[in-house]
Image: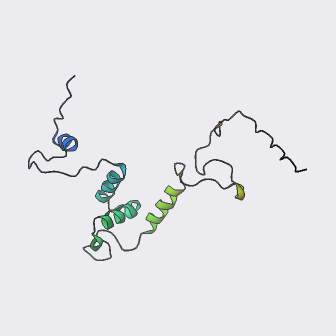
Amino acid sequence: MRRAVPSDIALRMYYTGIDPFTKQQVYIAKGLRDRKMQRALMQFFKPENYFAVREALMQAGRQDLIGNGCDCLIPAHPPKEAIEARRKRASDGDYYHTVANPAKGEKPGERGAIQSKTKGYRPGRKSRPQRQKPGSG
């Protein structure tokens, strides 16, 4: 079976990693994190992208583009909208980096995870009573 050859220049660059005109190696962002950073850099003016743009500029060694001057890309301090967007993303239903704390009265499972009617690993199973340890009365 023959594989189809990409006909578009952008597709060729993506699949081969080589610019067809200059025959030079081109960096292709294939990871999700890199693609998100590139998108944020192209939309640097949006307040919700502030932290991603700042991280990308720091990684690239371009701290000179962070500041309050006229030649800076983003301000030195995050705008209010950026902080609010970050907080909203952290409390979203898709946020799953923290585990519930039963000591604080939180239900077992992950905080923020979308709860359905079938919770847990074995939803229909009754919990088994704990056995008494031998010698304890």
Give how far across and how far down residue 102 sits, in percent: 70, 54
Place residue 115 in its image quadrant. top right
Q: Quick one: which residue is furthest to the right in this view?
A: 137
Q: As drawn, which residue projects farthest toward the bottom?
A: 69
* Quarter that holds the N terminus: top left
The x, y position of residue 11, in whole percent, is 20, 40
Q: Relative to residue 15, is residue 76 drawn left or right? A: right
Seen from the viewer's position, the closer of residues 79 and 63 is 63
Please give left or right for residue 39 compared with residue 86 in the image.
left
Q: Position of residue 93 (x, y in %)?
A: 55, 49
* Residue 124 pos. (x, y %): 70, 33
Instruction: Give the vertical position of 135 relative to 88 (above or below).
Output: above
Query: What residue lies at 8% left-to-right and 50% top-to-bottom?
Result: 22
Instruction: Identify the coloring.
Output: rainbow
Q: Which residue lies at the image location 71% right of the left edge and 58% below the top edge?
A: 103
Q: Report the side of 116 relative to 126 (left or right).
A: left
Q: Residue at x 32, y 75 (%)?
A: 67
Indicate whether 74 appears above or below 105.
below
Which residue is located at x 81 percent, y 41 percent?
A: 129
**In the image as oriented, which residue stretches furthest toward the front?**
135
Image quadrant assignment for residue 13: top left
Q: How many numbered dots are placed on residues in this image?
A: 0
Q: Residue furthest top?
A: 1
Up/down of 54 relative to 122, above or below: below
Q: Nearer the viewer, residue 96 or 131?
A: 131
